[in-house]
Amino acid sequence: MIIASIIPPEQMTMIAGFIMLAWVLVRRRVSARQRQRVEMTASDQAVAQQTAETKRSLPLSDAPVETQRWQVAMFDLQRELKADLDTRISVVSSLLRQVDERIAHLESLQQQRPSP
């Protein structure tokens, strides 16, 4: 042991400590990378599963019967409310058209009337 006779034992202990510290840090980094790879694989699988679930042709097709009935009722209510709104919009636009015609008629009468 030529090296042991040249380097004092205190320094050998310190060098051994540094080597062990480096080994521990390298092992931590390697295990963190492995853990990250596993998590990335799991997240990729979750994303693939979500995209596969969104490719269904009918929404809530695998839902319970009560949920599907609720969905149908909501669609019916939506259709009724939309029809009601369309009717009200057409009535308001018709009334606005009539008001515009009467305003134009009153303006024409006002122009025909002689000024005092």
Image (cartoon, rainbow, N blue to C red):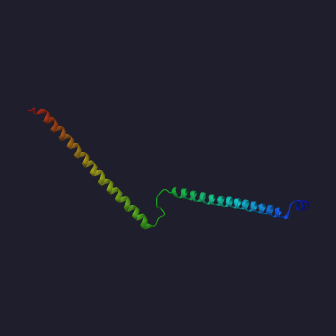
Image quarter in which the N terminus is found: bottom right
How many numbered circles does the render carry? 0
Left or right of residue 66: residue 19 = right
Q: Residue at x 81, y 64 (%)?
A: 13
Q: 5 or 103: nearer the eye?
A: 5
**In which quadrant of the rendered view does residue 37 lie?**
bottom right
Q: Position of residue 31 (x, y in %)?
A: 69, 61
Left or right of residue 45: residue 12 = right
Left or right of residue 94: residue 23 = right
Q: Residue at x 35, y 59 (%)?
A: 76
Q: Position of residue 79 (x, y in %)?
A: 34, 56
Q: Position of residue 92 (x, y in %)?
A: 25, 48
Q: 28 or 69: nearer the eye?
A: 28
Q: Residue at x 35, y 57 (%)?
A: 78
Q: 11 or 55: nearer the eye?
A: 11
Q: Position of residue 102 (x, y in %)?
A: 17, 41
Q: Residue furthest left?
A: 116
